[in-house]
Amino acid sequence: MPFVVLGSWIAAHVYLVWRLASLPGIAGRLPRWGLVTAAVFLALSYVLARLVEWAMPGHLAAALEWIGATWMGFFLLAFTCLLAAEVVTGFGRFAPGLAPAVRVGALGVALLLTLVATGQALRPPRLVRHEVRLAGLPAAADGTTFVLLTDLHLGNLVGARWLAARVEEVAALAPDLILVGGDILEGHGPNHHELIPLLGRLRAPLGVWAVTGNHEYFRGVEKSVANFEEAGMEVLRDRWVEPRPGLVLAGVDDLTMRRRTDPDGAAIAAALAGRPPGGVVLLSHSPLHLERAAGEGAGLVLSGHTHGGQIWPFGAFVRLAYPVISGRAEVAGATVIVSRGTGTWGPRMRLWARSELHHVTLRSPEA
């Protein structure tokens, strides 16, 4: 699979260089070797940032990561727009004289969308409020509130200042619990000694609870869990807790990373085994095995991971792997809430998929 992705990435850059070399204003003015050199640098800059950071962490690695991530976002939009232009012009066959101008226009649209996406990503997350009627929740627990953050991706591009603002937002909501849905630290960038104390400012009367995401595995899951515990979080690894009588909160390690070892979602059953009576909330980074979660007794499932596609139109591809990629849905009798994520991964861009904080009020059928 990595070779397929890498091959596609290279082939797409070859196509872009080929088209750029034929556009008015570029053809005959910029040497092809210059275009090729720039394309190779930009295509590899995100990976190069990791190598530089390993050798000498600092501003150079951060700059390379920003360049690589920004190029990634622009390139994906440019490729999409150029492909649309090719379809409209029949790859230049329908109107050969007009095709170059259409391609230039497509690149202009891609640049405009890049600016819009950057602006949307820099906006604070929108607050999404929910009331959820949770089967089994006793009347005494009616009105329990929590805030869900997920996919912070803290690192070079999403740093301490951004995190401090989110901590203040959560504190202003005064929830009973705080739930953190994984993909918290990128594993590179600012010293974690700077970020962990900020994470430690997340406080709630009934605790701060977290699960692992796929990025926790990339940087070493045990190391990640130790960082979260250092920040005062309780990490739910295929287990349940009862933060309030009659309210069961369960969490599982990331299901996407365990697709081969756990193709049927048996971890969900393990996490809910032996629980006491009450309303059940399941925190799972990836929105997988939702029917199984409902069948095992979860009345509310909370997930992230998908980013809602993050940059339109790539949500269409995310939907191929995950049936629910954002918003609220009912699945086999359970309420499912999938967050678009509070931060961003890769490009600091979001195109019509704004980041989110979720505030949930639980309602008892008995109240």
Image (cartoon, helix red, strand yellow):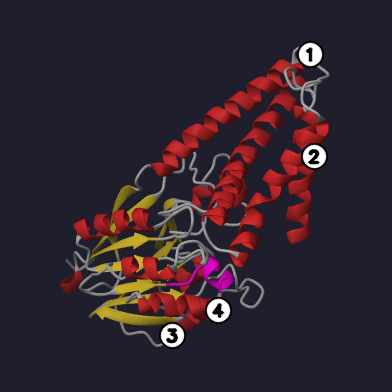
User: Spatial distance from mark 1 to mark 4, Cα to Cα?
Assistant: 57 Å
Mark carried by residue 266: 4
- Placement of 32 over or under 253, stated as above or below: above
x and y percentages locating residue 2 in the rendered image: 73, 60
Which of label 2 and label 4 is nearer to you? 2
Task: Give the secondary structure at mark 2.
Answer: helix
Which of label 3 and label 1 is nearer to you? 1
Q: Is residue 129 left or right of residue 265?
A: left
Q: Residues within 10 Å of mark 1 (few under 14, many from 20)?
A: few
Which of the two discs, 1 and 4, labels the residue nearer the N terminus?
Answer: 1
Amino acid type, label 2: Val
Task: Give the secondary structure at mark 4.
Answer: helix
Which of the two discs, 2 and 4, labels the residue nearer the N terminus?
Answer: 2
Which of the two discs, 3 and 1, labels the residue nearer the N terminus?
Answer: 1
Residue at numbered disc 2: 14
x and y percentages locating residue 263 in the rendered image: 63, 73
Task: Give the secondary structure at mark 1.
Answer: loop
- Give the residue displayed 62% in from the left and 48% down from the top: 317
Mark carried by residue 95: 1
Q: What span is colored magenta in the figure? A: 211-219
Answer yes or no: do the residues labelled 2 and 3 have beta carbons within 8 Å?
no
Mark carried by residue 67: none
